[in-house]
Amino acid sequence: MSNLLKLHPEFRVVLPEGATGGTGKLEYQGVYKVAAMLAGASTRIKVIIPDPATPRLGKIVNVTNNGDVLVLGALMGDPLPPYVTLTIYPTLASGKPDPVTLEGRPHEYPTGSGFWDLHDIGEDPNGPVVTSREQQINLLSATAAANEAAGKVTAEVTRWNAEQQGVQSWKADLEADIAQSTDLMLGVANSVPYANLAAFPPASTMKNRGAIAGDTGAVYQSNGTTWGNPVAYITTPSKTITPAGTNAQAQRVVSDLGVVYDLDTSGAAVDGIRYKQIGPLLTKYRRTSIAPIDVREGGAKADAGERDLNAGTDSTAIIQAALNAAASGNVRRVTGGGLVYRVNDSITVPVGVELADIILQIGTNGKTGVLVNTRSKFYGRIIGRGSISPDGVTYLQETGIAPATADVRRAVIEAECEHMALGVNGRFAGGNGTNVRNWDLNVRVQDIVGRVGFSQGYGLLLPGAVGCKGKLWGENIVRHGLYLSAGARDNVFDVDLEDVTSNSAVQLNTATDQPSTEGNTVTGKIRNSYVGCTLYQQAAASGLSDNGGATRENDIRLTITGGSNSKYALLAEGLPGATGTCRNNNFDGTRVLGAFVSNVGGTKSPLVKLRGTPNATWRNCTIAATHDFHMLALEHGALAGNVSPIDVGLIDVRGGIIDTMGGANTAIYSSVVLGTVAVNNIELRTTGAKFFYSGDAQTYRTGSLRRARGNASFADVPAGGSAELTVTWPQAITAPRITATVTSVSGVASGETVQAYSVTSTSAKLRAFNKRTQPQTIDVHYFVEGD
């Protein structure tokens, strides 16, 4: 698929108040990045305001010539196109607004137009929709079956017409015979041919001749001889009904479920018959309507208590029976009525079935609450027992939700998981390396427990996950809120995490023997966590070969706010001595705020550290925090004892602010030996002597690193004269450059000007000139920048 579509020229994006336009980018999912590039699709865009009358409606255009934006997409009949994410960064005179993100699968609509109007497939009820291969096969099978049935009907109609002709012929012959006998005609006038023997008249008045009770529907002459049996020429399929007999309690077999019932007027009505059940309980879930199955109908007891480890009746088998019945019937939704049920074993949601509005209290240490299959849906809450492993093995995987088999796809989960070791675990228990794909997750986790140093204490654990997306809320988590590893790729998550007590709230991790963790996007907020976010590379496990797995090409945009437990905000670190193991990661737009205590745990660490991370970008980021060590450290990655430092390529630090909030620590620290660090147009605010430190000549910077601005007012400047005043700024600026402009005058503007002179590292003098013939007040604004 190499079709290029144009963004519809009439599409407009709503910009924030005061925006003058914007810039942006187009990103393709996974391997389609290369395909889009080869096809000539656009990757960078900008936003212009085509109509001043509507200044908040921006048009998306090509960044080079304001022309069409081209996207890689699908025409009608093509395979499913990739997801495209369009991110727009509005431009404001001051401040930094949140980016605008649009996402969808580009497809031509209307057919033949060559346009994409930014609707996703299936979002527009009049546009194209997606059918799976399974649906297509079902449609073809249904069509073939319908054609076959139509052929059979046609054949039966033909046969019936032929038989009807035979009957009509026989009727003519019969009428001719009847006409030969007046007596017969009189007899036939009072008789009716029939096939229902039980309803045959008890007697005939014709010639006082009685009817033959056991006859076969033959027509008789008055003398008792027959004229034939016309009924025998008409063959009608019969239905045999087995009589109930004389026993009022005769048994009835329900064929679809194989359950025996007794006829009983006190029972429930099924198909017009009242009965009471004497067979298995699970058949109470038999449905002929579309109402959801309620587990209480089958006897499930909602008598458990939230975090009451001993209360309640085990309802595992009853809930499972309801789900199994839903899987085999015409109702695919099972509900718990919003009540709490104890389950001593795992509940498995079958393929395509939904379990909703239910609270499950796990009743056995170490169990998983819910196992999901492909296209399963779970909407509910799962409460664990809070079992902390005493030895790192026992109770290791007390889990809320996990896949029931390998390669579970398109599951939908909207759940709360609490008081357990793992909230949602994407690893199939039957083996490592089996991926979950395209899960849609909205998960809230809290009180996630575990033994420190073991694989416990995760909110959302997705090793090897592909194409999953969603929202994660979490608080009071021992180890990690979100953990992507071992080949996890093209996942998109927004997080809101607080109080992760002993490790990183968000971690992306790869061992070199694993597939690369790549192409993931993580946005959102993190508060008072031991570490905010970590991108890490580790060596291959013992006995496994290195296949080049890397943590690479991930997009991280987080707001990380410190607290009393916060050691540092962000760490990206490659494998010591290896090249490119943690590379090409993007932290653009990240913000670090609040108070951090770097010596939590006994050792100091920079607030943000990029160590052995080739081609990382830190652009338009904000650090405004208190800390007692380096604010931003850029290091080559050679650890102690390693004499071969990592070539970090180009680390791009551009735009944004670093403010130590009055602290005396170093704003930017660089110890890169191989590679280049480029620092461009970043505003640094610190009172420290080590405002910027570089341990290598390869590190360079351009543009202004420190800025100050302010306003001043000259009162009653004489007519045709001038006035002077001194302005100062709080932080020293080396070789400052200052500009000043007149912003207003109290009278009529007549070309008033302002001039700066006697500039020092902390002050300057301003002189305002009044061009009017009478005194007036002159207001000015000044701007200082330098190193």
Image (spheres, rainbow, N blue to C red):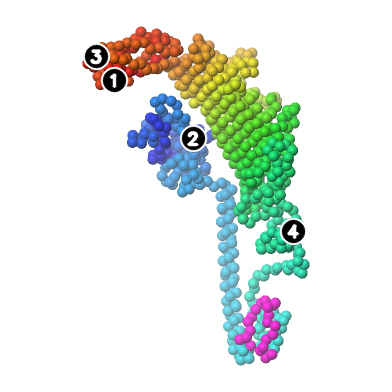
Q: Is residue 670 visible?
A: no
Nearer the observer: mark 1 or 4; the answer is: 1
Q: Which residue is pictured at 50% across the width and 17% down the height? A: 661
Q: Say whether marks 1 and 4 touch (CB < 8 Å).
A: no
Give residue 22's quadrant in the image.
Answer: top left
As measured in the structure, the alpha-carbon distance from the residue carrying label 4 to the one carrying label 3 is: 111 Å
Q: Is residue 296 left or right of residue 88?
A: right
Nearer the observer: mark 3 or 2; the answer is: 3
Q: Which residues are magenta?
A: 187-208
Q: Which residue is pictured at 69% across the width and 29% down the height? A: 450
Where is mark 2, residue-wise? 85
Nearer the observer: mark 4 or 3; the answer is: 3
Where is mark 4, residue-wise? 260
As measured in the structure, the alpha-carbon distance from the residue carrying label 3 to the one carrying label 2 is: 60 Å
As measured in the structure, the alpha-carbon distance from the residue carrying label 1 to the one carrying label 2 is: 51 Å
Local crowd at mark 3 within 10 Å, few (<14), some, or many (≥20)? some
Q: Say whether marks 1 and 2 touch (CB < 8 Å).
A: no
* Closer to the camera in the image, 21 or 246: 246
